[in-house]
């Protein structure tokens, strides 16, 4: 089984002073919007690392159907969440700010996402990383969008 690998590299942050939105209004990236962007970039990187770790586990999993099902469900959840985050990152600043209204303090989400990415890189901490991403999901109110990852192995 060949799995799609994703790059977990950090994207360079660009400071955009103003941009004309599709409705003709000039918008600016505020410091708050930049905080949201950094948190979303950290989440994207964490989802990529966890997805890659799940992909590796799937490739080396035994033929136990329950393990394969659980890993596949978790992989699907991670891919869906990464796609959601990418959609927000590509949106206009006002849309991104609206989507991130429940972030609270973006620095906390960024820190938790970075911790999840680090856990995904450790051999026996993959499901701790998934649990942390699920916690972030709950905190952001995204849990109702697409459910949660499968249970721990």
Image: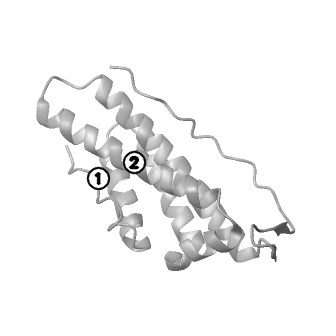
Query: Is residue 8 left or right of 117 when viewed as pictured?
Result: right
Residue 71 figure quarter: top left
Q: Is residue 125 visible?
A: no
Q: Is residue 5 visible?
A: yes
Query: Which image quarter: residue 111?
Result: bottom right
The residue carrying pointer 1 sits among few (fewer than 14), some (14 to 19) or many (20 or more) residues within 10 Å by Cα, namely many
Give the CA separation, mark 2 to mark 1: 7 Å
* Residue that numbered label 1 is attached to: 149
Q: Position of residue 72 (x, y in %)?
A: 27, 38
- Residue drawn at the location 31% of the way across and 23% of the way down: 59
* Residue 78, label in figure: 2
Residue 152 horizontal side relative to residue 92, left or right: left
Q: Quadrant of the C terminus?
A: top left
| Above or below 153: residue 61 | above
Single out the residue that lies furthest toward the top: 1
Residue 28 is left or right of residue 147, and the answer is: right
Q: Residue furthest right?
A: 17
Whether tag 2 and tag 1 are in contact, CB under 8 A, the answer is yes
Q: Nearer the viewer, residue 83 or 150?
A: 83
| Residue drawn at the location 42% of the way across and 40% of the way down | 51
Closer to the camera in the image, 6 or 18: 18
Residue 45 location, x and y as percent? Answer: 55, 48
As displayed, is residue 19 above or below residue 12? below
């Amino acid at each position: 089984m060949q799995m799609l690998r994703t790059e977990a590299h950090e994207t360079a942050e660009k400071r955009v002073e103003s941009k004309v939105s599709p409705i003709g209004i000039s918008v600016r990236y505020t410091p708050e919007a930049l905080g949201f962007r950094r948190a979303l970039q950290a989440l994207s990187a964490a989802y990529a690392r966890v997805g890659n770790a799940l992909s590796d586990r799937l490739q080396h999993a035994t033929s136990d159907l329950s393990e394969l099902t659980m890993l596949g469900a978790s992989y699907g959840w991670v891919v869906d969440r990464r796609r959601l985050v990418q959609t927000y990152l590509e949106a206009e600043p006002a849309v991104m700010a609206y989507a991130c209204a429940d972030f609270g303090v973006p620095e906390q989400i960024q820190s938790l996402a970075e911790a999840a990415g680090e856990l995904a890189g450790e051999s026996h901490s993959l499901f701790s990383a998934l649990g942390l991403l699920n916690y972030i999901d709950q905190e952001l109110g995204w849990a109702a969008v697409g459910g949660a990852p499968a249970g721990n192995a």
